[in-house]
Structure formats: structure tokens, C-alpha cells
């Protein structure tokens, strides 16, 4: 080979850094301001990456399963998967029944008859990739708009809330989970009926908790009280279990309380989830037709 | 062209592994060794600032696209990492592991520090000590540990595939 030629355009690295930083800032600004400009490019590239991720995850899962269940035959594993899914559904149903019982009690007290609870339609999906930075808590599912998935659909696992869909491609969708540091859910505490906000918090996540805050200072919420998604939420369907209160303390400002919440979903070992195909906004529209919502 | 293809394949493999099967070897909830930083550090150490920056930029862009956040965030961070590490290119020696190891650990720390400052501190997460102890240091150490193995492979690829394409061996001692 010939000797390496000096490039024709020899630019100082620091100028390259400057120019490319400007390109990055420009891209960040544009993707923030005009999200839909980049969406087609992004979905196209992702459609190429997703099958590869799916393949590797499938292989990884099967190797993992092989190690875990050395002596188990394949049919048995299928049976277990089916039973787990069924178990998740049943647990969810149990929660729903408990919640509707509680609702019933409350409604009896109020002498008003408003049925807050509806059956949700769900679709199962597999997690094929997890966000890699260690700072986000997002993951990719193997169902996309071809399967009828839309942005803002809620995602459940077993009996609890996993997160919400933020991006949909033809054959994949991205979920931002409730433990993501940038995720906020408006929620309600059982028994005391206090409104609050549940948000992911990376600091607390390392000890297995997420944050609950903006509870009223007069709230009598105690440990192990259940926290559900609030009917006031714009995107989350009501009455989905998020977790259990673990520790409540008063905030320094003397106006609110905050504390720790143990999420009901085991995010570390999550591999399959249920996507609720009912959207909150449709649900709200239905509600308005039926009767004025009671808050 | 071949060089670009080699780096493209490396980046693709890194992103795929990191987003899928690496969750099996995660430490705690979310500490996964950062293969992208390893590739960027190796590229910058072997080939200098400009090329390190380019590799970092495109690797970050691929991550941005698959991760689904703001486009350009990872690209900027990894590009910056590439630039910093490029300054060490003049000390490049084949088979040296200590210097690149220190570079990888430092780079991962700087990367997660930048991430914290730009995406967490700006939202009022001010408890920096907790992030350093629970996030940045474990990430840096875990990345350095895996880097021991990965750097051998990357250096081998560099010497066997990339380097012969543009080196005049008559000038190599």
C-alpha cells in the first residue's frame, strides 16, 4: 500500500468539534421542536434494527431458559408461559374486583351510582430490547401499529402498571416505564382517596423504590396502602395498581407529604407485558356521553 | 470504505448486544457495561481526535435513534468522549492495556456525569452524591472490567483489518 496521504481538507480537530457540536445542538433543538420531522427516518432505521434485536433477545432468552431449566422439556416451558400469563390476568382481575368492591363501598356511601370500572381489552407483547444508558427506563416491544398499537396506550404486567407507549413503528413500540426518572403519573391512594403524583426517581430506584409526592399534608395514608392510577389522569386509565406506599414523610415546605412507593411490577425480570388497547381519551369521550363525571 | 464498514459493524453489534442480552449481566437494576464507550475510546486512542469524534458521533446517533429520546444527545456526549480520548493518541502503543483501561473508566465516568448534568440536574435532581455512588462509579468500573476483554478484540481488529489498509510497513520499525 502507498503511504498514507495527507487529507486534502485538513481541519483542526477543535474546529471539527465545534462544528459537530453545533450540528448536535441543532438536531436536539429540531427533534424537540418538530418531533415528527425525524419520526419517519427513525421508524425506518428502527424497523431495520428491531428484527435483529428480536432475534438476539430470542436467542438470549432461549439460552437463559436452557441454563435455568436444564432438564425441562420445551412443552413444559410453553405451559409455564401460558400459565404465567393466565396468572397475571387473574391477579389483575383480583385487583379489579377488589377495586370495584372498594368503589362499591364508596358509592354506597355517596348514594350515587357511577360505575368507574370498565373491562379493558389487552394484547400481549414481548420485550425485545431495553434502553441501554442505565439512566432511562424504557424498553422496546415487538408489537407496532400493524397490531393496532398507538401512542399513549397503557402497558400492564400481571396486576400492575408498567408504563405508557411513547413511540410506535410498524413492527415495534417503545414504552416509558413508571420507574423512568422522567415519568409522572397522577395517582390516588386507596382508603384515604388522596390525590398524589407518582414519579420515577433514579436515586430511589437503586434501593427498589419510586417516588410518591404532592400528597396533602392532612393525608392519613400509611404504609402498605395501595396506590392506583387516578381518574384525573389524562393518559392513564383509572384504577390500575401502581404499587404500595412504603414510607411517608412531610416535605420541608409544610404543605405536602412525599415518600417511597414499592412498584407492584418486578421490572428487573420483566419479559412479557399486556398492552391495553383502550385509550384514555376515548374512554373520557364515552364517559361524557353517559353522564358528567363525578370528581 | 472498509474502515467505515468495520466501524459500522462494530457499532451495530455493540448497540444490539447492549440493548438485548446484556440485561442478563446487569449489575443491580440498570448498570450495564457500555460497549459504545469502549469502541469510541479504542478508535480515538488508535486514530486520533477527528476520527474518534466521528466514530463517537455516529455511534451516539444510532443509540439516539434506537433509544427514542431527543435526537443528538448521545451523539454529542460520545463525540465529546472521542475528542478527549483523541488527545491520548500520541501515546498509542500496541498491547498496552493500562492506559486505555484508565481512559475507558474515565470516559464512562465523564459520559455519565455529562448525562447527569444535562438530563437530571437541569430537572432539579440535585443530590449529586447519590448519583456518583450508585450510578457513575459502578458504571465506570463495570465498563472498565469488560473493556479488558473487549479492547483485546478491538485492537486485534485494528491491527489485522484496519491498519494494513493504509500503513506502509516499510516505515514501521
Image: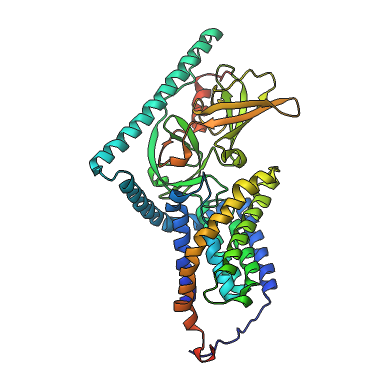
**Can the viewer see residue A125 in this picture?**
yes
Residue at 65 percent of width and 67 percent of height: B84
Q: Position of residue B15 (x, y in %)?
A: 48, 58
Q: Is residue B73 above or below residue A96?
A: below
The part of the image, by quadrant, that contains residue A192 is top right
Q: Residue at x 27, y 36 (%)?
A: A79
Of residues B67 and A131, the one drawn nearer to the viewer in this rendering: A131
Q: Residue furthest bottom?
A: B170
- Number of marks in picture: 0
Tell me: A157 left or right of A231: left
Q: Nearer the viewer, residue A120 or B31?
A: B31
Q: Position of residue B78 (x, y in %)?
A: 60, 62
Q: Identify the colour scheme used.
A: rainbow
Q: Residue at x 30, y 36 (%)?
A: A80
Q: In the image, is residue A71 above or below residue A190?
A: below
Question: Which of the two residues, A161 or B150, is positioned nearer the viewer here?
Answer: B150
Whether A10 is drawn above or below A185: the answer is below
Q: Is residue A232 among what the camera can see?
A: no
How far from the left and from the top, in percent, is residue A118? 44, 23
Image coordinates of residue A188 in percent, x first then y, are 57, 24
Specify the quadrant that holds the C terminus of chain B. bottom right
Residue B152 falls left or right of residue A251: left
The one of A86 and B22 positioned closer to us in this rendering: B22
Amino acid at each position: 500500500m502507498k503511504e498514507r496521504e495527507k487529507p486534502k481538507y485538513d481541519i483542526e480537530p477543535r474546529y471539527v468539534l465545534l462544528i459537530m457540536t453545533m450540528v448536535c445542538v441543532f438536531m436536539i433543538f429540531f427533534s424537540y421542536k418538530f418531533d415528527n420531522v425525524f419520526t419517519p427516518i427513525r421508524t425506518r432505521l428502527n424497523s431495520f434494527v428491531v428484527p435483529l434485536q428480536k432475534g438476539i433477545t430470542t436467542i438470549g432468552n432461549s439460552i437463559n431458559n436452557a441454563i435455568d431449566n436444564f432438564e425441562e422439556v420445551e412443552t413444559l416451558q410453553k405451559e409455564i408461559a401460558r400459565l404465567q400469563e393466565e396468572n397475571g390476568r387473574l391477579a389483575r382481575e383480583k385487583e379489579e374486583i377488589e377495586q370495584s368492591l372498594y368503589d362499591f363501598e364508596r358509592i354506597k356511601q355517596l348514594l350515587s351510582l357511577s360505575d368507574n370500572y370498565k373491562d379493558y381489552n389487552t394484547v400481549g407483547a414481548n420485550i425485545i430490547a431495553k434502553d441501554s444508558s442505565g439512566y432511562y427506563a424504557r424498553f422496546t416491544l415487538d408489537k407496532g401499529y400493524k397490531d393496532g398499537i398507538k401512542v399513549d396506550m397503557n402497558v400492564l404486567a400481571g396486576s400492575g402498571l408498567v408504563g405508557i407507549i411513547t413511540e410506535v413503528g410498524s413492527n415495534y413500540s417503545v414504552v416509558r416505564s413508571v420507574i423512568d426518572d422522567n415519568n409522572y403519573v397522577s395517582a390516588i391512594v386507596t382508603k384515604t382517596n388522596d390525590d398524589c403524583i407518582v414519579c420515577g426517581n433514579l436515586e430511589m430506584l437503586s434501593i427498589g423504590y419510586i417516588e410518591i409526592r404532592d400528597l396533602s399534608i392532612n393525608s392519613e395514608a400509611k404504609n402498605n396502602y395501595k396506590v392506583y392510577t387516578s381518574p384525573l389522569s389524562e393518559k392513564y386509565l383509572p384504577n390500575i395498581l401502581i404499587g404500595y406506599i412504603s414510607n411517608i414523610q412531610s416535605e420541608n415546605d409544610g404543605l405536602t407529604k412525599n415518600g417511597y412507593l414499592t412498584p407492584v411490577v418486578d421490572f428487573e425480570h420483566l419479559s412479557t407485558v399486556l398492552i391495553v388497547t383502550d385509550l384514555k381519551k376515548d374512554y373520557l369521550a364515552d364517559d361524557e356521553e353517559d353522564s358528567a363525571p363525578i370528581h | 470504505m472498509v474502515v467505515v464498514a468495520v466501524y459500522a459493524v462494530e457499532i451495530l453489534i455493540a448497540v444490539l448486544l447492549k440493548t438485548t442480552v446484556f440485561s442478563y449481566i446487569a449489575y443491580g437494576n440498570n448498570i450495564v457495561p457500555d460497549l459504545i464507550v469502549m469502541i469510541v475510546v479504542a478508535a480515538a486512542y488508535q486514530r486520533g481526535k477527528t476520527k474518534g469524534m466521528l466514530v463517537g458521533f455516529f455511534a451516539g446517533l444510532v443509540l439516539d435513534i434506537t433509544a427514542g429520546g431527543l435526537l443528538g444527545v448521545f451523539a454529542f456526549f460520545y463525540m465529546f468522549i472521542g475528542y478527549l480520548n483523541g488527545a491520548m493518541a500520541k501515546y498509542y502503543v500496541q498491547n498496552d492495556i493500562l492506559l486505555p483501561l484508565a481512559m475507558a473508566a474515565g470516559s464512562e465516568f465523564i459520559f455519565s456525569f455529562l448525562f447527569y448534568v444535562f438530563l437530571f440536574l437541569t430537572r432539579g435532581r440535585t443530590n449529586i452524591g447519590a448519583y456518583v455512588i450508585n450510578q457513575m462509579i459502578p458504571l465506570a468500573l463495570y465498563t472498565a472490567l469488560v473493556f479488558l476483554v473487549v479492547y483485546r478484540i478491538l485492537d486485534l481488529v485494528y491491527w489485522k483489518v484496519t491498519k494494513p489498509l493504509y500503513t506502509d510497513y516499510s516505515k514501521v520499525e
